[in-house]
Image (cartoon, grey):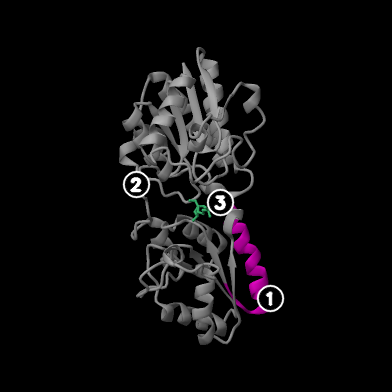
Amino acid sequence: MRVGVLTGGGDCPGLNAVIRAVTKSLIQHGRCEVLGIEDGFEGLMGGTPRVRTLGWRDVSGILHRGGTILGTSNSGNPLRDEDTVQQVAGHVRALGLDTLVVIGGDGTMSLAHGLQQRIGLPCIGVPKTIDNDIAHCERSFGFDTAVATATDGLRRIESTAYSHHRVMIVETMGRHAGWLALESGIAAGADVILLPEIDFDLSVVVQRCKEREQRQRYTIICIGEGAKERGADLTVRERIAHSPEPMRLGGVANVLRERLQPHLDSEVRATVLGHLQRGGDPTPFDRVLATRFGHRAAQLVIEGASGRMVTLQHGEIGSVAMSDVAHVQRTVPLDHDLIVTARDIGICFGDR
Ligand code: F6P
């Protein structure tokens, strides 16, 4: 049996651990050959497919390494048009691929699902994202590492905040989901956490900063990149995406800084953590989760399954139909235990 493996979408710590576990499990099972496809779906597009055989030695020593040895891309859409679909189908036939293991986020799952429907290539998905926003999966690998990195960033900001008596705004990634801002904000002891799920009132944030100006003399605000002020039509990312002119905004943290500063005596500074959150070696938790996911994906391949994505639900590794995951994003429920806990210990979410 010939099994293709690719990593699609933004990179994330733990990708190599999945590649390693899938490859080793399939090789150990026997009668399986693993082909690594380069740069996501792009490796199956164009005149010549870009693939390489993955043997035991190719995946040894990569468990702890961030990024992906296969490369990844956001841009390759195998369903772009009929010609592209036929080109991909031709490459799949020529390579003799029986199944494709696709490691990616919701966008990659949608493409894999569509590809399976169009050309009949069985696909198995493995959920990857630092945003932790994949439906039917309580924790994607990479998230734990990103929380640790963002928490470290917030803690470093805190020491300069209290020294200078400043209001410091720290922006995390996460797209339209607030998981990363919420967990890193709580872990770092942020005073205000602003999430995409809860539109904030500027006056509430101002009031919290003023209270702290009187007592602690500094404030840490952790804001998810998809957060928006009540009454604003679009998030900053959406404004940038819709703008005909290149916008000079440095993210939602800078917009909030401009809005807050006129109301406060303290100086306000903004930090965008950016791609730091996607880089670096995976934490032990992510290495273990990624290994479990990769192993389960290989088992699904061996069982002859298709159109399934590996999941973690209630602490157990399982799988769901890819069609249930495609185009769905898992945001933080407003009554989530973490939000309730944070509110009860006095963290401000900027709402009334
Ligand atoms: O989905 C992962 C993610 O890191 C988001 O948190 C972030 O909005 C986006 O990717 C950034 O993408 P890019 O690397 O294309 O700027």
The residue where tag 2 is placed is 327
The residue where tag 1 is placed is 163
Indicate yes or no whether the magenta region holds residue 150.
yes
Q: Which numbered mark, 2 or 3, is in the foreground of this view? A: 2
Q: Quadrant of residue 61?
A: top right
The residue where tag 3 is placed is 146
Mark 1: secondary structure: helix
Q: Where residue 111 appears, x then y in whole percent? A: 39, 39
The span from disc 1 to disc 2 (Cα, nearest Å) is 45 Å
Q: Where residue 204 appears, x then y in whole percent? A: 42, 79
In the depicted structure, whether residue 31 falls above or below residue 352 = above
The span from disc 2 to disc 3 (Cα, nearest Å) is 23 Å
Q: Which residues are magenta?
A: 147-168
Could you say which is closer to the camera, residue 50 or residue 293?
50
Label 2: few (<14), some or many (≥20) within 10 Å? some
Q: Residue at x 50, y 74 (%)?
A: 255
In the depicted structure, whether residue 179 falls above or below residue 49 = below
Could you say which is closer to the camera, residue 90 or residue 59?
90
Q: Give the side of residue 195 with respect to residue 264, left or right.
A: left
- Which numbered disc, 1 or 2, marks the residue that appears first in the sequence? 1
Label 1 with label 2: CB-CB less than 8 Å: no
Q: Which numbered mark, 3 or 1, is in the foreground of this view? A: 3
Indicate yes or no whether the magenta region holds residue 257.
no
